[in-house]
Amino acid sequence: KHLNGLLRPDSGKIWVDNILLNNISFNKLQDVRKKMAMVFQFGALFDSMTIRENIELAIRSLTNLQENNISTRIFKSLNLVNLEGIEDLMPSELSGGMKKRVGIARAIAINPEYILYDEPTTGLDPITTDKINSLIKKVSDKKKVTSIIVTHNMKTLRDVANRVIMLYEGSIIFDGEIDDLFGSKDKYIQYFVTGENK
């Protein structure tokens, strides 16, 4: 929420693409936000809209895409997350995993430079978690987008991350590569990673 300006920090500085966000004007903040998409923890789809309308709303709000290209963008976004042909369904007709994938499709439909994921595998079974992890990696690689993921899921870290920042009581206690995190001798990090308090 600090990266997309939904929250302003009490202290410290937030920089995105060499732009300081702390006291930025609303109009300039909107320019920064157009580079970002957010995938919410529980999908955040509008229940009264079809899948097509949910994705279309993001495209119309955040891009200048020509009218005749909107349907193509929706199709390509759903195709990338392996959900072709569901455009006319309602969110209530989808499983939890499918809703997460629609959330990702909506995010990539605006061609962002950054995708912010809030606990993308919360509430999902292990098989669906693996599918979402693979999808995040696929989107990152294919679209050349930077993915920033907030997660407590160690499997997601192992499968997706190439850099990890760990926070504890408001401070960074680790910033580095995934192997270094799992190899850390720090007692708190080990407890978090293994679930065992030694």
Image (tube, helix red, strand yellow):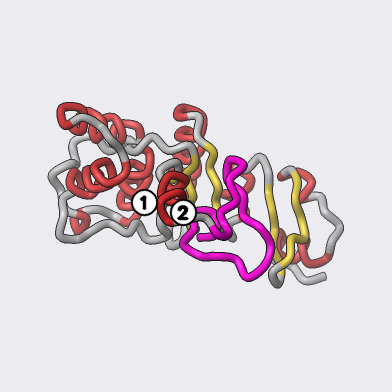
Residue plotted at (27% across, 38% down)? 83
Whole-Å distance between the Cαs marked 2 and 1? Answer: 7 Å
Residue plotted at (35% across, 46% down)? 101
Label 2 close to label 1 by CB (< 8 Å): yes
Q: What residue is disc 1 on?
A: 100
Specify the amino acid type for callout 2.
Answer: Pro
Q: Magenta span covers which residues? A: 1-23
Q: Is residue 98 left or right of residue 85?
A: right
Q: Can you see residue 71?
A: yes
Q: Determine the main secondary structure of the stretch shown in magenta.
A: loop
Callout 2: 10 Å neighbours few (<14), some, many (20+)?
many
State how many labels appear: 2
Q: Is residue 88 left or right of residue 41?
A: left
Q: What residue is disc 2 on?
A: 120
How far from the left and from the top, in percent, is residue 90?
A: 16, 53
Of 94 and 48, nearer the camera is: 48
Q: Judge whether residue 79 is colored magenta.
A: no
Callout 1: 10 Å neighbours few (<14), some, many (20+)?
many
